[in-house]
Amino acid sequence: MSILKAKRFWSEATPAEAETGGWLVELDGRPVRTPAKTLMVLPTQGLAREVAAEWNAQDGEIDPSKMPFTRTSNSALDKVAVQHREVADMLAEYGGTDLLCYRATSPQELITRQKEAWDPVLDWAAKSIGARLQVGAGVMHVAQSDTALTVMRDIVRNMDDFRLAAFHDLVGISGSLILAFAAARDYCDIDRIWQLSRIDEDWQAEQWGIDEEAEEQAEFKRGEFLHAKRYFDFCAET
């Protein structure tokens, strides 16, 4: 059975200031709503411009896969806003099992590579956000201090719905709360942060060769990771 796809019905999408504050995206004067029929009120003009550009780029049938700013905005309003505390706490739990804290036991070259790549980020987190995480080797659980976990949880809880929606992807794709903080706070270039999340995978590829399917999936995730960073940054612009 074929599935009917929505087609473009508007001439122009434009940002417009909302009377109650924030920014709308209007399709020929009619405001965009989310799939749950929530009025899409965005925090910044820059974000509204990105969403409007996606709608203007649609030609014929609407392709949601080519509308990442719209998709993340929908998630912020329809999913995050209605369970903000639950989403924040779920993401904060990554701090208790953070990728950067679990190190290889061999070979020495991988141990050294992880240490040189990840220790500086953990040092930065200790100074920048006040959360010093402990490191272990192997798969045994590494207990983190209640102080560090509380600090990180409070930071995540204090994000607004839109930043939290983007932060969700930064954490989930990288597998690291610390790397997500590093991305959000411009610790270094976002591509470098992505590379830091791929230390183990890159090592395996060097040893056993590149798997084309895995590489294709990794490139897709990289695009999603970079988008999440762009979205997070647009939330702070005016």
Image (cartoon, rainbow, N blue to C red):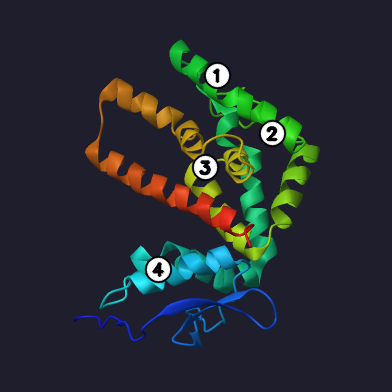
Task: Give the amino acid type for the residue marked by disc 4 in the picture.
Answer: Glu
Please indicate, yes or no, whether residue 101 appears anywhere in the rendered image.
Answer: yes
**Contact between labelled residues 2 and 1, with CB atoms less than 8 Å apart:** no
For mark 4, what is the residue? 54
Q: Disc 2 or 3, which lies upstream in sequence?
A: 2
Marks 1/2: CA–CA distance: 15 Å
The residue at 50%/64% (across/down) is 72
Mark-to-mark CA distance, 4 and 2: 35 Å
**Residue 180, percent from left and from top:** 58, 44
In the image, which disc is placed on residue 175?
Answer: 3
Whether residue 174 is situated above or below residue 207 in the rendered picture: below
Circle number at residue 125 = 2
Q: Is residue 35 left or right of residue 205?
A: right
Q: Is residue 71 above or below residue 37?
A: above
Q: Please state which of residues 199 and 47 is positioned toward the viewer in this rendering.
A: 47
Graded by Cα atoms within 10 Å as few (under 14), some (14 to 19) or many (20 or more), the crowding at tag 1 reads few
**Residue 238 sits in which quadrant?**
bottom right
Please say if the residues under marks 2 and 3 sit with CB atoms less than 8 Å apart: no
The image's mark for residue 116 is 1
Q: Earlier in the sequence, mark 1 or mark 3?
A: 1
Q: Amino acid at mark 1?
A: Glu
Location of the N terminus by quadrant is bottom left
> SS of the residue at dot 3?
loop
Q: CA distance from mark 2 to mark 3?
A: 16 Å
- Could you tell me if the residues under marks 3 and 4 are in contact, i.e. CB atoms within 8 Å? no
